[in-house]
Image (cartoon, rainbow, N blue to C red):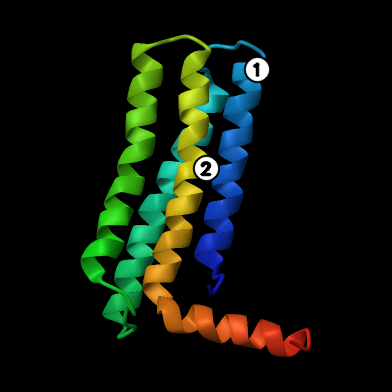
Amino acid sequence: MIVDAWLIIGGILGLASTMVCFVAAVLKKKPNDITLLALIAVELFIVAYTIGSIVRLANGETMAGEAWEFWGYMFTAAMLPVAGFYWAMMERTFWSNYVMGAVGVTVVVMAARMAQIWYGPAAAVQASHALQLGIGL
């Protein structure tokens, strides 16, 4: 799999959001500005990723995988922080921070899958082959 800037940024933001929310949950804190801002950061990343993907397609870049699958993952990833925020507003207990923490790590996994769809399985095979050549297999 090709690791691009979108995956790196999404991974950092998603895992940071998860850690912030899980620490708050372990400390038995109710959802607060910090945990909600961590969730909002994940949502803003997805919005930027959506815009970036549209720009890439408009500039002639093509997706190796199915477009409907990529945009389905994108839509779902965009709805997860919204659902987590709604949950946190409806249930103001420390358990909501666990739900919000799950959103961050789930978006990381979905961003990895979107990268696979964008670059395709051939890129994964090429990267694997290059790795095998690099370590002498």
For mark 2, what is the residue? 105
Ranked by sequence position, the earlier of labels 2 and 1 is 1
Image height of 6 relative to 108, above or below: below
Position in image of residue 64 (x %, y %): 34, 80
Circle number at residue 108: none
Taking the spot 74% from the left edge, 87% from the top edge, the residue there is 137
Residue lying farthest front?
Answer: 137
Dividing the picture into quadrants, the one containing residue 65 is bottom left
| Residue situated in front as seen by the camera: 53 or 122 | 122
Residue drawn 52% across and 82% down? Answer: 125
The answer to whether 55 is drawn above or below residue 111 in the figure is below
The local secondary structure at tag 2 comes to helix
Q: Is residue 54 left or right of residue 101?
A: left
Residue at the far left in the pictured view:
68
Give the amino acid at mark 2. Answer: Val
Q: At which x and y percent is residue 134?
A: 75, 87
Compared to residue 36, the image places residue 137 above or below, namely below
**Tag 1's secondary structure?**
helix
Q: Crowdedness of circle 1 by 10 Å Cα count: few (<14), some, many (20+)?
A: few
Q: Check disc 1 and give the amino acid type.
A: Val
Q: Quadrant of residue 59?
A: bottom left
The structure residue drawn at horizontal position 78% and vertical position 84%, both measured from the top left corner, is 135
Q: In the rendering, at what x and y percent does residue 63 appear?
A: 32, 78
Q: Distance between the residues labelled 2 and 1?
A: 17 Å
Tell me which residue sits at (49%, 34%) in the image: 102
Q: Which mark is residue 26?
A: 1
